[in-house]
Image (cartoon, grey):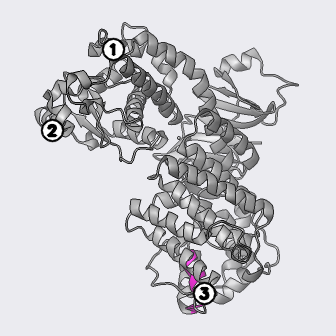
Amino acid sequence: MAYARTLAFVVCVVAVLLTTPQTFAGEQFHSDPHVGLDYYLDTHGRVEPSRLPRVYSVFESVLRCADRSSVTSPRLVIADDRTQAAAFVLADGTIVLSRRALDVIASGAEPPIADARLAFVLGHELAHLANSDFWERREPAQNRIAPAERQKKELKADDLGFLYAALAGYRVDALLQPAAATPDFLTFWIDQIGAQDDPGYPSAEARIELLRVRLQERAQAVQSFQFGARLLQFGRYRDALDLLEEAQSRFPSREVFNNLGYVHLRLAVTRLPPEFAYHYWLPALADLHTPLARLTLRAPAVAQPRSEWRIPPAAREDLIEAVRYFEMANAQDPRYVPSQLNLAAALLLLGMDAMVFETGAMPANPLLRAELAVANASALVANDPSLRVLGQVIEFEQRRAGKAADAAVGPPPETNDPALAYDLARITMQSDPALARKYWRRALGDFDALPAAIRALVCDQRAALSAVIADGNLDNRCSQELAARTRGTLPWKLPVQLSRDLLEKPLTETERTSQGWRQTQLARAKVFSAEASAVLAIDDITTMVVLRNVAESAQALVRCCSQPQEKIPVAVGELWRYESWIAWIRDSQVREVWVVN
């Protein structure tokens, strides 16, 4: 399943209820909004998503970053109405835009600017949904929302819409640029929809002022979040923790909570023996692979017996903190599958320590809580084999903890997925060695598909595994894997040298001007960003350089730098990791390149 190996991170409008829903079907919108919507769509027709792929792509990007505290599942509907600039949301999560609204949004704008405008509009409507702003359902006119109260709600939706669009990577600052004959897009928008005199809408001046104030604040939150998520990919957990905690102070969203929990989960993993930490290919642990788990060709390691596995106190504290953050993400959005899976992974690791049950170190059985998290995820994503296998792993560990003579579970599903085969091999080794052998062969048959840490563990235990699976090629695969780590010299020139001390050698005015960098000051870091590049300096040492809009295809990258060491699925596209840099691939194109010191 997509969620099982996806971390929700982001590389994650105006709008307003642009026209009041009752315009389309009179008072029907008050008694039953969907009667009015059906009438509207019957009158004008519906535009199929396949005809507007870019619009739906922007919607999906913003949706990943929006507050999903509502129990509804947002969906976008485009009405083929070319006369009214309509944008509104219903209580069931239906967001409606008209073709006229899309035309206004795109008017006189290059695609990136039009996308930013659209992201803002969609973010605004998603904010209304999160805040349960559904005044179209109020009955008589005298009971409807007062204009002053509605203005407050509109400005609050603007505020969140700005942030959602920015977190999704769109240039909300472009809303301040001239549009047609007006000084900015917001003024142009209000002119186009004829809402200048509507007492329920804030003025364009009020919206612009809010945007100006928020841009600086939001820039800090977005930069903290994005660079924290990027540093996660390189195993820079302490730096990532600082940045994500700063982002949390500005915008405590489900994604920030989830990533904070993930940092603590990864910190705990670095303190565990590899055979403990990577005994299973857990969904969360397969998302971001740490380069700290370096492949070696030392003599095969002697695995510590399961009965001796113990979680060190520092690792236990990190796991408990991870659980806390994942539960906070779940409380904010019970439908957010990544945090449910990450919660199950953290609780499973806690439950694999026998001392938990012998000493009562946890207030509740972590394996039972892990089982509940998987059940919650399964209710959202039905009939998913990844969730079924994770549930079987948890059941297996529960039986082991209960000293069951036969800890077997089953029947396991048929699968060619190396992740599922790896986990099924682990839980069938004692009860059904022949079946375990089959799963081991499937898991190791595509050796490059294994995460780096699991490849390292397999190679450390290659002698024992070769005997189990009757495969003498593991030594050769491990040797090839070690040689492959010399691949991937960065083919692009960086705009600034990494590890440069900006106190001793500050950026010159010429450097800033040539790159077009704008500076954002964070708590203990500075960010210099422009359309083509960004630089993160932690404690005045250049730590990361981001190259954007790299004009390179994924195929050209392979020809240039060979295959990456790993391909890591993320919320949008995938990350190709080389030795000291990562390329973000989306739609077969290199979108960004991240390089660390």
Magenta highlight on residue 245: no
The residue furthest right is 504
Compare residues 27 and 306 and report the one nearer the observer: 27
Alpha-carbon distance for marks 1 and 3?
67 Å
Q: Quadrant of the N terminus?
A: bottom left
Amino acid type at image mark 1:
Ile
Element type where label 3 sits in the image: loop
Compare residues 48 and 134 and report the one nearer the observer: 134
Of tags 1 and 3, the one toward the viewer is: 1
Residue indicated by mark 1: 190
Disc sitting over residue 35 in the figure? 2
Q: Residues within 10 Å of mark 1 (few under 14, many from 20)?
A: some
Residue 192 image-quadrant placement? top left
Q: Determine the residue positioned at 35% across, 36% down.
A: 55
Q: Residues within 10 Å of mark 2 (few under 14, many from 20)?
A: some
Say whether residue 560 is visible.
no
Of tags 1 and 2, the one toward the viewer is: 2
Compare residues 486 and 516 and report the one nearer the observer: 516
- What is the x, y in percent for residue 42? 12, 37
Say how many tags the image has.
Answer: 3
Looking at the rendering, the stretch of residues picked out in magenta corresponds to 423-433
Element type where label 2 sits in the image: helix
Above/below status of 269 relative to 552: below
Please name the predominant secondary structure of the magenta segment in the image. Answer: helix
- What is the x, y in percent for residue 438? 53, 85
Above/below status of 155 relative to 560: above
- What is the x, y in percent for residue 501? 84, 30
Alpha-carbon distance for marks 3 and 2?
59 Å
Q: Residues within 10 Å of mark 3 (few under 14, many from 20)?
A: some
**First-in-chain label (1 vs 3):** 1
Residue indicated by mark 3: 429
Alpha-carbon distance for marks 1 and 2?
27 Å
